[in-house]
Amino acid sequence: MTDWVLRGGEVIDGSGRPRWQADVTIAGDRIAAIGATSRVEGARELDVSGKIVAPGFIDVHTHDDRALFATPQMAAKASQGVTTVVVGNCGVSLAPLVLDDAPPPPLDLIGDIPDYRYERFAEYLAALDRTPAALNAACLVGHSTLRVGAMRALDRPAAETELTQMCERLQEALDAGAIGMSSGLAYAPAANAPAAEIEALTALLRPAGALYTTHMRNEGDAVLDSLEESFAVGRAAGVPVVISHHKTVGRQNFGRTAQTLPIIAAAIARQEVGLDAYPYIASSTVLSAAQAERALKVLVTWSKSAPEQASRELSAIAADWGISAAEAVARLQPAGAVYWMMDEADVQRVLRFEHTMIGSDGLPHDVHPHPRLWGAFPRVLGHYSRELGLFELEEAVRRMSGLSAARFGLTGRGILTAGAYADVTVFDPETVADRATFEAPRIPAAGIEHVFVNGRPVWTDGKPTRERPGRALRRQQLQAEAHHS
Ligand SMILES: [Zn+2]
């Protein structure tokens, strides 16, 4: 029983193979067929001639743990053609953790005290089942979240009893359906976690067939040490490692991705390693003096103590207040910021690297967010593929669908083929473009025409449809489907 016919478009299937013209039919939550189709009684037809029909994009690097509930239409992502988000990155997940005190940065990027209310990971997934969002979600457990839940003081390695508790909670999360664990070793809550602590936790991932993602300890002067540390964790645990938002930061490290990428390629030859990147020269996270000092420019994205300063440059705030930038950082706390600290040549080199997946790293709760939240995927398709010619459109799509689904084990998604889940994005290859800017960061992209999740439209005519067909993707189910396909 066909529900939709997408007629006359060019199919880019997510595998990297060249596009071809075909109709795509959807029945229930699946792709029914790809090929010439006559008119079907009762099915809705969309004329998509001149448009690309692609697998829905997978945002492998998000902080949407709470956004799935707070903004269930997920317009920031649906408007980019994203149909699945991987949440819980950089060591920070909403579950499993119950808080009575303010979450320490960077846990405050995704929630406040009442948002941290899931004692067990199973409760978080059950909440997603009960109140689904428009998009699918695959969930990582944050190492920093485990630390905050188990430790009285975070400025040291976990004691044995604390580590035991962290292991129990991680195991519960894996049993509930988490796809892996993330770490954020660059951040204060995890900076004093030694390799042995990470290895004790990641040892639980292998029996589960789960993976490890890491916001490395250092992306600046010591980036090579951090890469080696990350690979060593993967080797010791025997699990795939994903290097999050790969970059080299700080002026003295401009150009060093020419060094890191061959090292990553060599690691990929001997163990399972992946990486993701967002297509901008500015990063964004909590506001810290150390990061502000290294940046060429700093834009404040939110501040609890001075909310009116969001969207202003740190240097202007400091000048207004007649104090130093470092003093302004202290007065704005807790706060978030955008930091200009990458070189465009590095961004392009990482994007061109054949193993790089696209992840937005968007921060959905920021008052004045980094434009990657609304623009990352169309920016790769429009600016970097069409305008700069970094790669063919087929390759751009593969980096945001087929490659990502394979790396994260998202069975039945990321490739447009008969029998796959009907996560589909229809876009105009001539006009697709990011429109969100650092000044006006919430402008939806151009050229994303129709987005389907599990066979139901979630974004059409430049608006969310209000349908909420998203699912919590559990590891066990994904693995079972992989064995049957
Ligand atoms: Zn991160």
Image: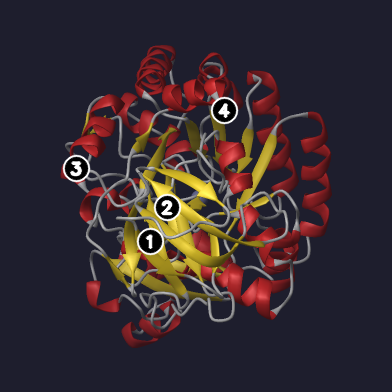
Residue at mark 4: 194
Disc 3 to disc 4, how far (Cα)?
Answer: 38 Å
Q: Earlier in the sequence, mark 2 or mark 4?
A: 2
Can residue 327 be seen by looking at this rendering? yes
Lower position in the chain sequence, tag 2 or tag 3: 2
Which amino acid type corresponds to the residue marked 4 in the rendered image?
Pro
Mark 3 vs 1, N-terminal side: 1
Res 103 → quadrant: top left
Tag on residue 78?
A: 1
Alpha carbons under labels 3 and 1: distance apart: 17 Å
Query: Looking at the image, which residue is at 60% across and 68% down?
Result: 380
Amino acid marked by disc 3? Thr
Amino acid at pointer 2: Thr
Callout 2: SS: strand
Question: What sort of colour scheme is used for the picture?
Answer: secondary structure
Residue that carries the numbered disc 3 in the rendered image? 131
Disc 1 from disc 2: Cα separation = 6 Å
2 vs 4, front mark:
2
Cβ of mark 1 under 8 Å from ligand 1: the answer is no
Q: Position of residue 15 (x, y in %)?
A: 67, 49
Residue at 56% from the left image edge and 17% from the top image edge = 203
Q: Are marks 1 and 2 in contact (CB under 8 Å)?
A: yes
